[in-house]
Amino acid sequence: MIIQPQIQGCVARNCHPIGCRAAVAQQIASVKAAGPFNGPKRVLVLGASSGFGLASRIALAFGAGADTIGVSFERGPSDKGIGSAGWYNNIWFRQAAEQEGRIAVNLIGDAFSDAMRQQAIASIRQQLGQVDLVVYSLASGIRLLADGTQVRSVLKTTGQPFSGWGLDLEHDSLVQQSLAPATPEEIRDTVTVMGGEDWQLWLQALQQADCLAPGVQTVAYSYIGPESTYPLYRDGTIGYAKEHLHATAEAINLQLAALGGHAWVSVCKALVTKASAYIPVLPVYLGLLMGVMKERGVHEGCIEQMQRLFASKMYGPRGVVADGNRLIRMDDHELDPAIQAAVSALWSKVTPDNFHALGDFAGLRRDFMQLNGFELAEVDYGAPVNESALTELTP
Ligand code: NAD
Ligand code: NA
């Protein structure tokens, strides 16, 4: 079978499994090139199959020699299709990690469920004994609560409606998008799905099960962004959820004190991932930002961000490097006033006719395609993919 990309709006409907292998290999090579660091040896990654979670897992396994258990929600091949990119990322990661003698376990299922917490606890006991680090990198539009209620997050603003140019990845064009103000219920629901409650449930369950090693650390990922994006993010429903996540870090930090452990939030830079491509208007900011940051030589992708986070801002010679609010700032380059001034100047001029000339929308698009295994230079997309061989692969 020859696999062609199917993009619908800003969602990829399929993936190229062999391309996913090349993308994972590229991330591994990037971490190896950056050199080893003295990081945690036993790690649980929640949301391990793509984006920041996958990059974290790769940085820790191949940079610090960590054994890892990764939890994610992904689809394998079936009569409905080839399966999701994250499904293959898990498999290719495990194969590469095992080749270097690392333990790599993939748990597939709902990270919001108690059943998955119990499965992870059993796996930690069996494979690792305890963990030194828990990475919380879930991004989801829906959370199933223990009582069976389904809660949905929304991407809306608060206060006044907000509209601007958005990016249509399917047609490579700009389209008007708007964010309506959320109702109080929508804000609350988004906090339930994307806030810190589930992170805390994980750390409580792990601590009760004696799965956390002395000095354990946990980190969750957040975004703040520049003032120009506040209506889209910080003052939107997702911003409320992140505010809750930040507050939860303090509660978990207190809980971990008994073990000499700590909970942190890492505020990352805006990057193309499955989750971020879905936020209205933000990808236009991102395309302009990528252009400016590349021009100034400070661009980072997911893997460079996570490698720098662990090697120099969490496990480097200075230990954890955080700001006065105990936030680890990986958005330092993005928020550089000179960079923001350049982005704002471009943003005020951007139109459907000139956007390619003003920002790195080709780079953004390529990153998006590569998340799904497409447009990698080293892959021969004319070569047929052996579906039955893929069906035999297990997570
Ligand atoms: P992503 O979509 O690439 O990854 C999400 C991960 O969560 C995947 O591994 C997916 O399988 C997993 N997942 C989702 N629902 C699940 C469930 N019910 N059970 C188990 N696993 C589940 O997203 P991402 O952009 O890497 O986001 C990760 C975190 O980083 C989020 O908290 C996000 O807000 C944050 N962040 C992202 C950006 C950005 O620009 N992309 C910037 C700063 C912070
Ligand atoms: Na992730």
Image (cartoon, helix red, strand yellow):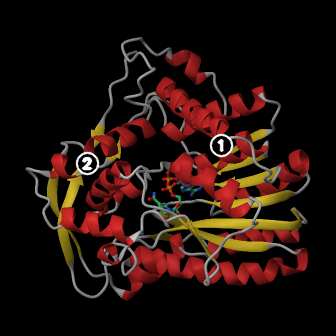
Label 1 neighbour load within 10 Å: few <14, some 14-19, many 20+: many
Q: Which residue is mark 1?
A: 58
On the image, the x and y values in percent for residue 305 come to 55, 53
Instruction: Tell me the element at label 2.
Output: loop
Residues 379 and 146: in front is 379
Q: What's the residue at 27%, 56% (across, down)?
A: 288
| Residue 280 in sight here | no
Q: Which residue is mark 2?
A: 9
Q: Is residue 373 left or right of residue 114?
A: left
- Which quadrant, please, contains the N terminus? top left
On the image, the x and y values in percent for residue 153 come to 43, 70
Q: Nearer the viewer, mark 1 or mark 2?
A: 1
Q: For the residues marked 1 and 2, what is the alpha-carbon distance in whole angstroms?
A: 29 Å
On the image, the x and y values in percent for residue 391 come to 57, 23
Q: What's the residue at 37%, 29% (across, down)?
A: 375
Q: Is residue 387 above or below residue 362?
A: above
Residues 148 and 230: in front is 230
| Residue 365 in sight here | yes
Q: Is residue 110 left or right of residue 343?
A: right
Q: What's the residue at 59%, 59% (across, down)?
A: 137
At label 1, the amino acid type is: Ile
Which callout, 1 or 2, points at the residue further toward the start of the chain?
A: 2
Residues 353 and 101: in front is 353
Q: Which mark is residue 283?
A: none
Single out the residue that lies furthest toward the top.
383
At label 2, the amino acid type is: Gly
Mark 1 lies within 8 Å of ligand 2 (Cβ measured) = no
